[in-house]
Image (cartoon, rainbow, N blue to C red):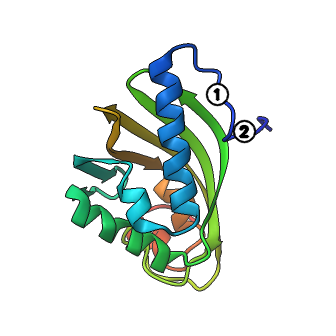
Amino acid sequence: MMPKTSPFTSTASSEAARANHKLWLEHAVAENRRELERLIGTLHDECVYEVVPSGLVFTGKKEVRNFYRGLWEGIPDVKLDLLNRIDADDCIVEQSEVYGTMSGTLFGFPPSGKPIRFKVVIFFPVREGKFVGERVYFDAAEIARQVPGAIGQLGLAG
């Protein structure tokens, strides 16, 4: 098992990468505290969120608010454990494990009412000192195996 990365420290070697880490930390704290407007404050006006496996795209701050509301309704007790993070001059890349109880629809998957756990990789491009959005990658089959009936929807063997 890979050791977890501390969210509070950075090995960034440039001022730009350190600034991006600080922005990421502000974003992560706001997300964990469900402070939606504080979180939105870390985003560029032209932000775009992409949930790559599902094809969902959220353009602009209004739609991104809906993304977070959907996440927090889908998994009301959602937590992210940071596994790794790369702080670069033009982006942040995060690998985390997401877990909680899937009480609502999540990325097109029906609610299961059961605990769920899956890994994500999130790419945060940065422009003008703000995140231009997120590109979220995860293994849809990993989620589907935990949601009754979802395997058949994906056409996968159980």
**Residue 80 picture quarter:** bottom right
Q: Residue at x 38, y 49 (%)?
A: 42
Q: Is residue 153 visible?
A: yes
Query: Image quadrant for the C terminus?
Result: bottom right
Instruction: Sort mark 2 into few (<14), some (14-19) or many (20+) by Cα contacts within 10 Å.
Output: few
Q: Is residue 88 visible?
A: no
Kind of element beneath mark 2:
loop
Give the percent coordinates (x, y) of residue 126.
34, 33
Question: Which residue is found at the position 53% from the left and 33% from the top?
Answer: 21
Return the mark for residue 10: 1
Q: Secondary structure at mark 1?
A: loop
Amino acid tagged 1: Ser
Which residue shows up at 75% across the image and 39% down it? Answer: 4
Quadrant location, the N terminus: top right
- Mark 2 = which residue? 6
Q: Amino acid at mark 2?
A: Ser
- Name the residue nearer the viewer: 95 or 132: 132
Label 1 – label 2 distance at C-alpha: 8 Å
**Residue 118 location, x and y as percent?**
60, 57
Q: Nearer the viewer, residue 141 or 124?
A: 124
Q: Residue furthest top?
A: 13
